[in-house]
Image (cartoon, helix red, strand yellow):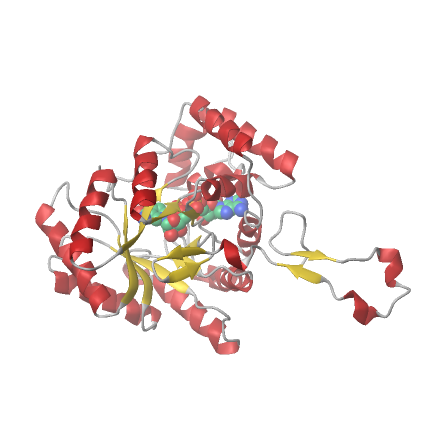
Amino acid sequence: MAFSASTPTSYFTPFSASSETSLPSSSFKPIKIPAFWPWQRVKVGPMSVSPMGFGTWAWGNQLLWGYQESMDTELQRAFKLAVDNGINLFDTADSYGTGRLNGQSEKLLGKFIREFQGKKRAQDEIFIATKFAAYPWRLTPKQFVNACKASLDRMQVDQIGIGQLHWSTANYAPLQELALWDGLVAMYEKGLVRAVGVSNYGPKQLVKIYDYLKARGVPLSSAQVQFSLISMGEDQLEIKDICDSLGIRLIAYSPLGLGMLTGKYTPDRLPRGPRGFLFRQILPGLEPLLSSLAEIAKRRRKTVPQVAINWCISKGTIPIPGIKTVKQAEENLGALGWRLGSEEVLQLEYAARESPRKMIQNIFQTR
Ligand SMILES: NC(=O)c1ccc[n+]([C@@H]2O[C@H](COP(=O)([O-])OP(=O)(O)OC[C@H]3O[C@@H](n4cnc5c(N)ncnc54)[C@H](OP(=O)(O)O)[C@@H]3O)[C@@H](O)[C@H]2O)c1
């Protein structure tokens, strides 16, 4: 595999090419520079995770992401490349994959982990962060615990890294919300999950669940929210502040704006399906931001997605970009091992504010 300056692993050879001929070849083993250093790992509850995880929504979703089972070999190769380069956090959900493909993302992730660890024991553990949907028929804590057991079954693992509530029902079914919280407590107490987290919780709900769990002796370890250069509104910044003050780790989902921040889509070159419809509304307003991303990428000898992901890391979050191919995994790994300067961060945020269109928020996002 060819590696460039912007790929995950670089090789450093202390001698010039011409000197290689004059010394025995055994002297020239290249030094492998890892995608990131061990001390750059991040604590999430009791776990030490890579500064970036990968998202797997596309691993089973046909409507938005065009998933087909014929993609599985490529997905497995992308997974292996990620783990070989130190990525040990993978985000999934029990709702990723419906109908015949029910739970497909969790199933694939479990299979890939088993087959990877079967061949060669992973040096470090791989942590799965899954999300439990607040379906209207999941009304009691026991039903949430059963949902967790169903995920464990699908993945064929004994324990989940982070068990997350996919969304809050506080706005439309407040009584169900309490069942969700108690379900999370029960999963944790039974040891089915190492840590608990939430997703799509706004600042107010986040503080409420934090207090509730704390009173029950359960630490809230993570909060997942849409966070990117096109999703950095007041709520996101308030959530980040709350996370910092309470010791909760913020996981940034859709850090590439569903692909809009990769630079590969334009108003004339749109993805198929519902994303195309969404991008047609938003992309024409992203010109200042996309230009700024491209300019910094060029100056840094990085790529546009690498800069967009690195911005999330620079803001103190753990981004979980979605990947569908080895090439995307490899490129996104190049977001690690370096850091945008504060001027560059400001330049990007200024350009983002100058861009009139923003990402739409998840319908389940609460205040
Ligand atoms: N908690 C929640 O409610 C929630 C909601 C959304 C997402 N998530 C999680 O967050 C993860 C990431 O978010 P996301 O998948 O929605 O969006 P994203 O990370 O912003 O975008 C991912 C998509 O961008 C494209 N892409 C990725 N890397 C690329 C590269 N280097 N070059 C070119 N294209 C690239 C791929 O799609 P194409 O190749 O098709 O363009 C990929 O599927 C999800 O997988 C999921 O685990 C959680």
Residue at left 61%, top 41%? Answer: 302
Of all residues, the one furthest to the bottom in this rendering is: 118
Near-viewer residue (139 or 197): 197
Q: Is residue 94 left or right of residue 299?
A: left
Q: Is residue 256 visible?
A: yes
Image-quadrant location for residue 204: top left
Q: Position of residue 214 (x, y in %)?
A: 20, 54
Against 240, residue 287 (above or below) is above
Q: Position of residue 103 (x, y in %)?
A: 31, 62
Against 225, residue 324 (above or below) is below
Of all residues, the one furthest to the right in this rendering is: 22
Residue at left 70%, top 57%? Answer: 11
Q: Is residue 207 left or right of residue 318?
A: left
Q: Position of residue 355 (x, y in %)?
A: 44, 24
Give the number of callouts.
0
User: Which corner quadrant holds the N terminus?
Assistant: bottom right
Q: Is residue 254 left or right of residue 302?
A: left
Q: Position of residue 319 (x, y in %)?
A: 43, 47
Against 9, residue 289 (above or below) is above
User: Which corner quadrant holds the C terminus?
Assistant: top left
Image-quadrant location for residue 157: bottom left
Residue at left 34%, top 44%? Answer: 244
Residue at left 44%, top 40%? Answer: 315
